[in-house]
Image (cartoon, rainbow, N blue to C red):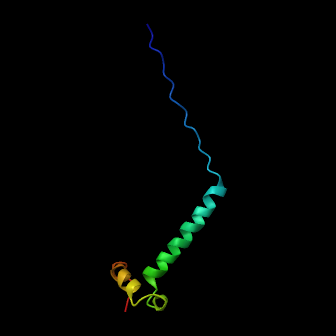
């Protein structure tokens, strides 16, 4: 008796329309630029709109960890 051969399933290509990716890519890019700004260069100018030095103190250790000058 011969054993039946089992064919491996063929991979199915998933097509993701570019129209669905572009808005999320733009959102992620803008969000990452805002985060990068606050972690690297924001030294109090934006904090004039908020209370005290809350943003500066919250990101203080992250700046030093990433070797960005803070003071």
Residue 18 against residue 10 in the figure, above or below: below
Residue visible at 46% across and 81% down?
A: 38
Q: Quadrant of the N terminus?
A: top left
Would you identify the image quadrant in which residue 28 lies? bottom right
Residue 46 against residue 19 in the figure, above or below: below
33 and 58: which is toward the camera = 58
Q: Quadrant of the C terminus?
A: bottom left
37 and 44: which is toward the camera = 44
The reply to whether residue 69 is in sight is no
**Residue 16 in picture, x, y percent from top left:** 61, 50
The reply to whether residue 59 is in sight is yes
**Residue 23 in picture, x, y percent from top left:** 62, 63
Residue visible at 44% across and 91% down?
A: 44
**Residue 30 in picture, x, y percent from top left:** 56, 72
Residue visible at 36% across and 81% down?
A: 58
Residue farthest to the front, as pictured: 51
43 relative position to 12: left or right: left
Residue 6 against residue 29 in the figure, above or below: above
Residue 21 against residue 7 in the figure, above or below: below
38 relative position to 17: left or right: left
Would you identify the image quadrant in which residue 20 lies? bottom right
Residue farthest to the top, as pictured: 1
Q: How many marks?
A: 0
């Amino acid at each position: 008796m011969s054993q039946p051969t089992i064919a491996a399933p063929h991979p199915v290509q998933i097509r993701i329309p570019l129209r669905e990716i572009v808005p999320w890519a733009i959102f992620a890019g803008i969000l990452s630029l805002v985060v990068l700004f606050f972690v690297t260069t924001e030294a109090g100018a934006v904090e004039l709109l908020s209370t005290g030095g809350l943003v500066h103190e919250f990101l203080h250790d992250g700046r030093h960890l990433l070797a960005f000058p803070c003071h």
